[in-house]
């Protein structure tokens, strides 16, 4: 099975092109705090290839998920710890249901970079240690263009 079959017509063309052109995945450097520290080169995000996206894993006591849908496990955990129905972001409170529906395409040190279909496939970071999110680009194309 291919990721385009799971999300037919829903993933950005720029992202699907990246997957096609980088069958082994890739690494993208991105500074999510460029306003505060413009000289910092940023974090090295590991962009998953098609096979890695579809691999499943288990979060003990929570459930199983494919890598691309792993945010649903983290959101479930947040809810079990009574974190409410929203999480903070740089653009206001975001519903946890919306975060859970995010399409994860990369990872760095336990944090995830994902597409938010509810916001026009903008690019966000999910911070696993706090459950908060950060909107970092309007689109996957913008994400690629703003990476050094």
Image (cartoon, rainbow, N blue to C red):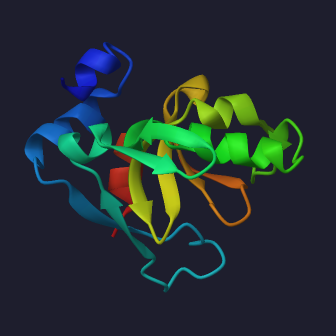
Task: Check the image and report above or below for 28 versus 87.
Answer: below
Name the residue furthest bottom.
Answer: 39
Name the residue furthest front.
Answer: 61
Task: Check the image and report above or below for 95 versus 80.
Answer: above
Looking at the figure, which quarter contains the N terminus? top left
Q: Left of 98 or right of it: where is 102?
A: left
Residue shown at 59% from the left, 82% from the top: 37
Please identify the quarter of the rendering in which residue 101 is found.
top right
Task: Check the image and report above or below for 137 versus 34.
Answer: above
Residue shown at 30% from the left, 42% from the top: 53
Where does the image place residue 110, in percent across and percent down from the top left? 51, 66
Q: Nearer the viewer, residue 64 or 32?
A: 64
Whether residue 92 is visible: no
Please identify the quarter of the rendering in which residue 145 is found.
bottom left
Q: Nearer the viewer, residue 137 or 75?
A: 75
Q: Nearer the viewer, residue 54 or 141?
A: 54
Please identify the quarter of the rendering in which residue 93 is found.
top right
Residue shown at 50% from the left, 43% from the top: 70
Q: Left of 17 or right of it: where is 29?
A: right
């Amino acid at each position: 099975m291919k990721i385009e079959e799971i999300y037919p017509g829903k993933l950005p063309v720029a992202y699907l092109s990246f997957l096609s052109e980088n069958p082994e995945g890739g690494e993208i450097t991105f500074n999510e705090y460029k306003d505060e520290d413009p000289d910092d080169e940023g974090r090295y995000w590991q962009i998953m290839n098609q096979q890695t996206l579809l691999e499943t894993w288990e979060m003990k006591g929570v459930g199983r998920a494919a890598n691309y849908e792993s945010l649903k496990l983290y959101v479930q955990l947040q809810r079990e710890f009574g974190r409410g129905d929203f999480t903070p972001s740089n653009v206001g409170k975001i519903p946890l249901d919306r975060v859970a529906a995010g399409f994860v395409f990369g990872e760095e040190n336990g944090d995830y970079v994902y597409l938010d279909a509810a916001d026009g496939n903008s690019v966000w970071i999910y911070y696993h240690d706090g459950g908060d999110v950060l909107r970092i680009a309007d689109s996957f194309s913008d994400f690629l263009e703003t990476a050094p």
